[in-house]
């Protein structure tokens, strides 16, 4: 692994695996992350031994070890509800001051395909379900933490037969978190041999910085051996997040470690959680590795911003 990588893998990776779980599961991956009362809270996707996923809370005093894992899921599918009968996957969480709550966006999976599901929580002990807010097929969603020009902004990845998205990142706006405007384009896959040519989707909720919204996203390249999931970096305008200010040409994290190379789905790094500690300037990126375990990589926000600001301005 190159010394020059922007994010450093934590030496204790993978920090959480199925073996750490208090009940029998197949795999844990793709966690959302939050800091609550000084503790790190992860909302992990837990795949059971039927293949269905639910979301479970893990808490740690330092975000690396001494995890206490809830014995019951925070969000589990209700069998009577077709839109979630195949489970919940890949949560993102964001603190929304106006609501005084965390907003959870995740994938609800059912026979009609993946949909964007929204819930809120005050403490990661109970949730209030809003339900499906974007119908199938749609996934990889995160809410910006405050309204822009009076409206909430949801980044997501719809896919329809009618020209509504080609594996790209779009955004929709809402006055009430219930009705959403038609999606507007944000970021597209790049053509041909690019690392993010097959499809892209957001990673963690974009982080507000003085320079713009820092967008960490995943990109997939199709190969004869299957897809390779890597991670990229872009910067969106604070007031008009459809405006891409910068996009780094190369990926910033790729499956290189053995636990990213091999697992249920090889060659996958899939980040859904990002925490910034203002005091140390440390960024902690939580990601799923090979759809099998939960990992952590760290960087300094200052270095990440320098990298993205070094990229050529987008046309
Ligand atoms: C994506 C999502 C992720 C998963 C990734 C790799 O489409 O389903 O949950 O980690 O594929 O399998």
Image (cartoon, rainbow, N blue to C red):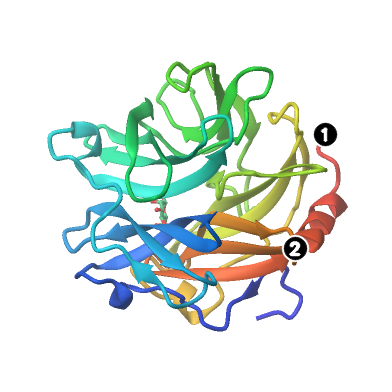
Label 1 sits on residue: 315
Q: Tell me residue 252's x, y (percent).
A: 68, 62
Q: Is residue 216 above or below residue 290?
A: above
- Ligand 1 lies under 8 Å from the Cβ of mark 2: no
Residue for point 24% across, 47% down:
76
Q: Which residue is label 2 attached to?
A: 279
Ligand 1 occupies quarter: bottom left
Quadrant occupied by the N terminus: bottom right
Which residue is more in the foreground, 199 or 6? 6
What percent of the width, then of the height, locates residue 81?
A: 18, 33
Please name the residue shown 48% across and 18% down the image.
176
Left or right position of 273 against 237: left
- Toward the front, the furthest residue is 37
1 or 2: tag closer to the N-terminus: 2
Quarter of the image holding residue 50?
A: bottom left
State left or right for residue 184 relative to residue 28: right
Mark nearer the viewer, 1 or 2: 2
In the drawing, does residue 242 fall left or right of residue 222? Answer: right
Give the residue drawn at x 69%, y 29%. 242
Q: Viewed as shown, does residue 311 lie left or right of 173?
A: right
Q: Marks 2 and 1: in contact by CB < 8 Å?
A: no
Q: Point out the residue furthest to the left here.
A: 80
């Amino acid at each position: 692994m190159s010394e020059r990588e922007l994010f450093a893998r934590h030496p204790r990776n993978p920090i959480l695996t199925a073996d750490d779980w208090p009940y029998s599961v197949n795999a844990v991956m793709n966690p959302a992350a939050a800091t609550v009362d000084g503790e790190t809270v992860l909302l992990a996707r837990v795949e059971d031994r039927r293949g269905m996923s639910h979301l479970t809370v893990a808490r740690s005093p330092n975000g690396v070890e001494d995890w206490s894992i809830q014995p019951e899921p925070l969000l589990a599918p209700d069998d009577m509800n077709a839109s979630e009968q195949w489970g919940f996957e890949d949560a993102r969480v964001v603190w929304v001051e106006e609501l005084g709550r965390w907003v959870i966006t995740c994938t609800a999976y059912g026979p009609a395909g993946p949909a964007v599901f929204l819930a809120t929580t005050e403490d990661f002990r109970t949730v209030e379900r809003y339900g499906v807010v974007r119908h199938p097929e749609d996934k990889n969603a995160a809410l910006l933490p405050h309204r822009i020009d009076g409206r909430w902004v949801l980044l997501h990845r719809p896919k329809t037969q009618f020209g509504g998205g080609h594996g790209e990142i779009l955004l929709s706006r809402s006055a009430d978190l219930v009705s959403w405007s038609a999606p507007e384009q944000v970021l597209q896959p790049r053509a041909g041999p690019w690392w993010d040519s097959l499809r892209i989707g957001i990673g963690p909720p974009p982080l507000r910085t003085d320079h713009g919204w820092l967008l960490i996203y995943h990109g997939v390249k199709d190969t004869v051996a299957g897809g390779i999931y890597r991670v990229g970096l872009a910067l969106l305008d604070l007031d008009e997040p459809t405006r891409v200010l910068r996009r780094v040409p190369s990926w910033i994290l790729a499956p290189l470690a053995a636990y990213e190379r091999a697992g249920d789905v090889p060659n996958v790094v899939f980040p859904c959680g990002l925490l910034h500690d203002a005091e140390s300037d440390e960024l902690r990126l939580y990601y799923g590795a090979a759809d099998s375990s939960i990992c952590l990589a760290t960087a300094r926000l200052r270095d990440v911003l320098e990298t993205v600001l070094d990229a050529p301005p987008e046309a």
